[in-house]
Amino acid sequence: MPELNVIREKTLMREWSRARRYQGETVALVPTMGFLHEGHLSLIRTAKSVANFIVVSIYVNPGQFAPSEDLSTYPSDLVGDLRKLSDAGVDAVFCPADLYLSASGDDSARHSGDAVSQSEGNSCVEDGNRDHETWVRVEKLEKGMCGASRPVFFRGVATVVAKLFNIVEPDIAVFGKKDYQQWRVICRMVRDLDFDIRIIGADIVREFDGLAMSSRNVHLSPLDREKALSIYESLRKAKVAVEGGQRNCQELIALTKKTISEAGGKIDYVEIVEQQSLKTAEEIVCPVVLCVAAWFGNVRLIDNIELNI
């Protein structure tokens, strides 16, 4: 098996990718924030089925975290991640230290992959926000759902993904549909800004008991993890109801909220929206997606299920 190519500098990453594309090969990018699990590995397998070379980025993006959010506690295991990526047959890993210009204007790469480097990244972007002035907004799709409770989130996501696209220059990029709104935001950004990149949305990967895989699951206490299974239970109940002829979205939302709340979850939102436009649906007359965000303990989990009639 070829040795995994770990790239930390933007210029070297761009050169690596261009060399492969110059030879007529296709390059697929799988963006991640590290602490990889089977869900990430499934994205890599999807990418390998459609491209010749696979790049995985590992970058905990400070631009998508508000000051009160969990950047400093986001789990990290770079050594373990690189081992998994090597075993998965990934060709290159892009591990930049900081994708935003610091106050000094120095965007040179430095990455240790531990909590210290993440903390430094947070400080850098707080200072660097005064230097970094260009942000990408997908104005309608970023509103509502996660955008309502995390107002800077999608601005940070769209900006960092645009930067990754400009650095890696992939032909294809693969995103998980667990972050459904994020996937649609990226699709719209690519369309509107004429990125010549094919975006693939990969299905949610679940634990054996139905819990959607997430790097944040590690923070759940055993009791909260058990309670969190109510999210998937609520989604399945909604799907069964739709299959039985239920079309009223408010009744489906009430059923979903009841299931999660009775298990001890604190609802952030439950919404049913059209799959592409993310417009709120009152009656199911076209393909929709039921999206949920709920807190269990101090961990916020998201999940969804597509409802097609």
Image (cartoon, grey):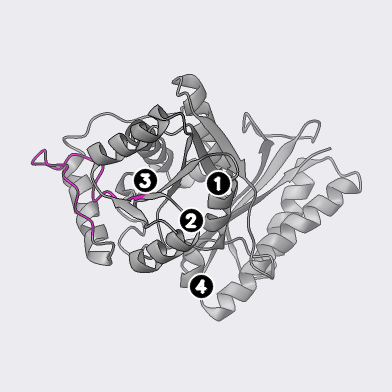
Circle number at residue 64: 3
Q: Earlier in the sequence, mark 1 or mark 4?
A: 1
Residues marked 2 and 1 touching at CB (< 8 Å): yes
Q: Please state which amino acid type lies under the numbered disc 2.
A: Gly
The residue singled out by tag 1 in the image is 48
Q: Earlier in the sequence, mark 4 or mark 2?
A: 2
Q: Which residues are magenta?
A: 93-111
| Quarter-of-image position of residue 236 | bottom right
Q: Earlier in the sequence, mark 1 or mark 3?
A: 1
Q: Please state which amino acid type lies under the numbered disc 4.
A: Leu
Describe the element under mark 4 as helix, strand or loop.
loop
Quadrant housing the N terminus = bottom left
Q: Is residue 102 magenta?
A: yes
Q: Earlier in the sequence, mark 2 or mark 1?
A: 1
Give the distance between the C-alpha atoms of the residues marked 4 and 3, in whole angstroms: 22 Å
> In this rendering, does residue 142 appear at all?
no
Q: Residue furthest bottom?
A: 222
Q: Please state which amino acid type lies under the numbered disc 1.
A: Lys
Pinpoint residue 166: horizontal percent, then vertical percent.
34, 31
The residue singled out by tag 4 in the image is 220
Which residue is depicted at the point 69% across and 70% down? 209
Describe the element under mark 2 as helix, strand or loop.
loop
Task: Using the image, determine if residue 58 lies above or below residue 180.
Answer: below
Circle number at residue 89: 2
